[in-house]
Image (cartoon, helix red, strand yellow):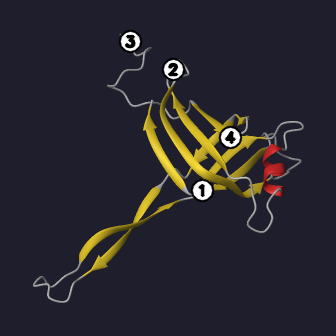
């Protein structure tokens, strides 16, 4: 075997992925970052403990915001429209699925964001002396990150 077929000896490449937003919003993203989870540490020591230090217990989980970057296409304003729906504590919270794909386009690792909503939408910068493509950024706040193997 010359490496043309992915197996469990080699790590998956990170360049082949797909993002789906509940409700049918699908976009080809250039970059996804922020797939981080962390647990608070609660330090506790009861009054009659003979040990002169605290014990550490897991506390609440925290998740970082997810940043998604994609090219700007003619007429594609779906994420700006979703962002503009924000009013005082009312926004359409959606499930977002991020899939790392193998060479056949099959999902291998799946990250699912619960109750995600657009915290920030950043349009592209404009520069008349540049030949780069226009790239916009969507930042999602969410309330949970579940990772599964396909």
Q: Nearer the viewer, residue 6 or 83?
A: 83
Q: Earlier in the sequence, mark 2 or mark 1?
A: 2
Q: Position of residue 84 (x, y in %)?
A: 84, 57
User: Which residue in the rendered view is the most extreme toward the bottom?
Assistant: 47
**Residue hosting label 4:** 22
Cβ–Cβ below 8 Å for labels 3 and 2?
no
Q: Nearer the viewer, residue 111 or 114?
A: 114
User: Which residue in the rendered view is the most extreme toward the left?
Assistant: 50
Q: Nearer the viewer, residue 112 or 130?
A: 112
Relative placement, left or right, of 126 versus 44 is: right
> Splitting the image into 4 quarters, where does residue 53 fall?
bottom left
Q: Secondary structure at mark 4?
A: loop
Badge 4, how many Cα within 10 Å: few under 14, some, many 20+? few
Front of the two marks 2 and 1: 1
Between the C-alphas of marks 3 and 1, the distance is 41 Å
Badge 3, how many Cα within 10 Å: few under 14, some, many 20+? few
| Numbered-mark total | 4
Q: Earlier in the sequence, mark 1 or mark 4?
A: 4
Between the C-alphas of marks 1 and 4, the distance is 13 Å
Q: Residue at x 71, y 51 (%)?
A: 138
Cβ–Cβ below 8 Å for labels 3 and 1?
no
Q: Position of residue 13 (x, y in %)?
A: 48, 31
Relative placement, left or right, of 142 versus 8 is: right
**Residue hosting label 1:** 142
Between the C-alphas of marks 2 and 1, the distance is 29 Å
**Residue hosting label 2:** 103
Q: Earlier in the sequence, mark 3 or mark 1?
A: 3
Q: Position of residue 15 (x, y in %)?
A: 56, 33
Q: Secondary structure at mark 3?
A: loop
């Amino acid at each position: 075997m010359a490496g043309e077929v992915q197996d469990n000896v080699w790590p998956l490449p990170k360049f082949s992925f797909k993002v789906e937003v509940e409700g049918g919003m699908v976009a080809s993203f250039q970059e996804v970052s922020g797939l981080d989870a962390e647990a608070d540490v609660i330090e506790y020591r009861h009054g009659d403990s003979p040990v002169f230090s605290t014990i550490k217990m897991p506390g609440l989980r925290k998740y970082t915001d997810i940043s998604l970057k994609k090219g700007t296409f003619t007429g594609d304003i779906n994420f700006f429209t979703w962002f503009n729906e924000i009013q005082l504590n009312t926004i359409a919270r959606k499930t977002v699925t991020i899939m790392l794909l193998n060479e056949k386009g099959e999902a291998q690792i799946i990250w699912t964001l619960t109750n995600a909503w657009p915290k920030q939408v950043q349009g592209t910068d404009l520069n008349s002396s540049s030949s780069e493509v226009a790239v916009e950024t969507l930042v999602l706040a969410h309330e949970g990150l579940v990772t599964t193997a396909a």
